[in-house]
Amino acid sequence: MASDFWLVTGLGNPGAKYEGTRHNMGFMCADVLAERWSVSFSDHKGLAKLGKGVMSLGGRRVKFFLAKPLTFMNASGNAVASISAYYDIPPEHIVVIHDDMDLEFGRIKVKAGGSAGGHNGIKSIDRSLGTPKYARVRLGVGHAQRGAHAHDNTINWVLGGFSPAQRKDLPVFLADGADAAETVIFDGLAKAQEKFNGR
């Protein structure tokens, strides 16, 4: 009997040196949800910070877990699979929030399944769950310069901070990301796509 809980996971890297970087958009968005629904985090098997809460929208209540993996991005799947197995949460009740270089800063795309788009956190979750069929809220961070040092540029880019203008827009963007995750849970994937993907 699968539980009626949802699992919302924001991806990022633990530790002070990664705070506020593009790659930690998922963590930041999870923090917005934690504040919004009064979730406090505690340790889950050393693999994640995990909290439990109830979302209440439009007269409906949904119980959910909120996770921030501590495994570092490339092993995010270990944390997600562990929580999903422990609490018996099926992939169709999982929402993963992550940064995405294929989208301009400020753009949000909601999807389920499909390719990991070169995102190591997503590749790891696909592997660990054995399926890509969970919902993803992709938060655009824009793209690094391509060219001779494309790989290094990409690493420096995702582990870099935001411009002053972007920092100013960040709170609204993260709130939209949190809204997108809630919309998936309450109204379903198609509605969330309709609402956010065209923006």
Image: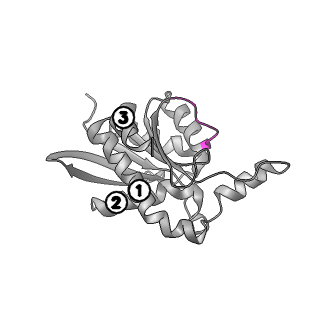
Let me know if residue 89 appears in the view.
no
Image quadrant occupied by the N terminus: top left
In the image, farthest residue toward the front: 199
Q: Nearer the viewer, mark 3 or mark 2?
A: 3
Q: Is residue 198 magenta?
A: no
Q: Nearer the viewer, mark 1 or mark 3?
A: 3
Q: Going by the image, does 57 lie left or right of 48?
A: left
- Alpha carbon distance from label 1 to label 3: 19 Å
Describe the element under mark 2 as helix, strand or loop: helix
Q: Going by the image, does 60 lie left or right of 10?
A: left
**Picture quadrant of residue 62:** top left
Let me know if residue 152 appears in the view.
yes
Q: Main secondary structure of the magenta part?
A: loop
Q: Going by the image, does 169 lie left or right of 17?
A: left
Q: Label 1 belongs to which residue? A: 30
Q: Report the residue at 50% width, 50% height from top.
A: 107
On screen, 133 above or below 96? Answer: above
- Type of amino acid under label 3: Leu
| Mark positioned earlier in the residue sequence (1 or 3) | 1
The circle on residue 96 is none
Q: Label 2 belongs to which residue? A: 34
Q: Label 3 belongs to which residue? A: 189
- Type of amino acid under label 1: Ala
- Type of amino acid under label 2: Ala
Measuring from the top left, give residue 140's x and y in whole percent: 55, 50
Tell me which segment is drawn in magenta: 114-120
